[in-house]
Amino acid sequence: MKVAIFIGSVSDKKNMKAASEILSRFKIDYKSYVISAHRLPDILSETIKKIESEGVDLIIAGAGLSAHLPGIISSKTILPVIGVPIFNNNGLLGGVDALFSIVQMPKDVPVATVGINNSYNAALLAVRILSIKNKDLKKLLLKFRMEIRKKLENEIEQYL
């Protein structure tokens, strides 16, 4: 199992860190790329072809402001793409501009979209998708869910 993480700008890198942490926790191989969809479209296209030939199963792409990166990637591949809208203090709209750019994809160019700055959930969604065909990963995911449940039950107990 392999995942590619695309980041639109170096300034967005810190917001995508949680995705790499989750993928590592589930022992999923990944590689990150910082490529602007607007400034380096040729390099983006070449990199998409490269990762497809390397057997990547899924793409997570995070971008802020106009946030076209996930959509452009989706237009160039049939791999599932999960978009992460990013708010990075450079915009005035709190990341809503990026959210709308990613979630309002035209028909035939799907991008799954998570909440603003939520690369954590993007990676968990990737794990869920990949676990469909991988029994070991599914077991790890179920164990993770039980750990979360126990943690929350322990937190609740102190208020009962």
Image (tube, rainbow, N blue to C red):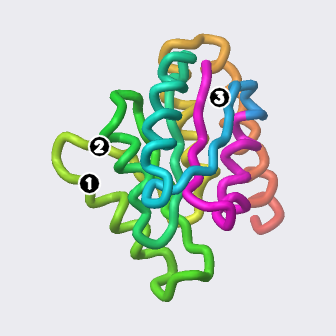
Q: Which residue is mark 2?
A: 110
Of residues 60 and 151, the one nearer the viewer is 60
Residue 80 visible to an observer of this rendering = yes
Residue located 16% across and 47% down the image: 107
Query: What whole-number distance in Å separates the C-alpha atoms at marks 1 and 2?
Result: 6 Å
Dot 3: element: helix
Q: Where residue 129 sits: x, y (%)?
A: 48, 28
Q: Write down the region rendered in magenta.
A: 1-23
Residue located 66% across and 46% down the image: 19
Q: Which mark is residue 141?
A: 3
Query: What whole-number distance in Å separates the C-alpha atoms at marks 3 and 1?
Result: 29 Å
First in sequence: mark 3 or mark 2?
A: 2
In the picture, the quarter occupied by the C terminus is bottom right
Whether residue 10 is in magenta: the answer is yes
Q: Which residue is mark 1?
A: 105
Is 154 placed above or below 45 here? Answer: below
Decide if residue 105 is on the left or right side of residue 58: left
Number of labels in the image equals 3
Of residues 157 and 105, the one nearer the viewer is 105
Residue 149 visible to an observer of this rendering = no
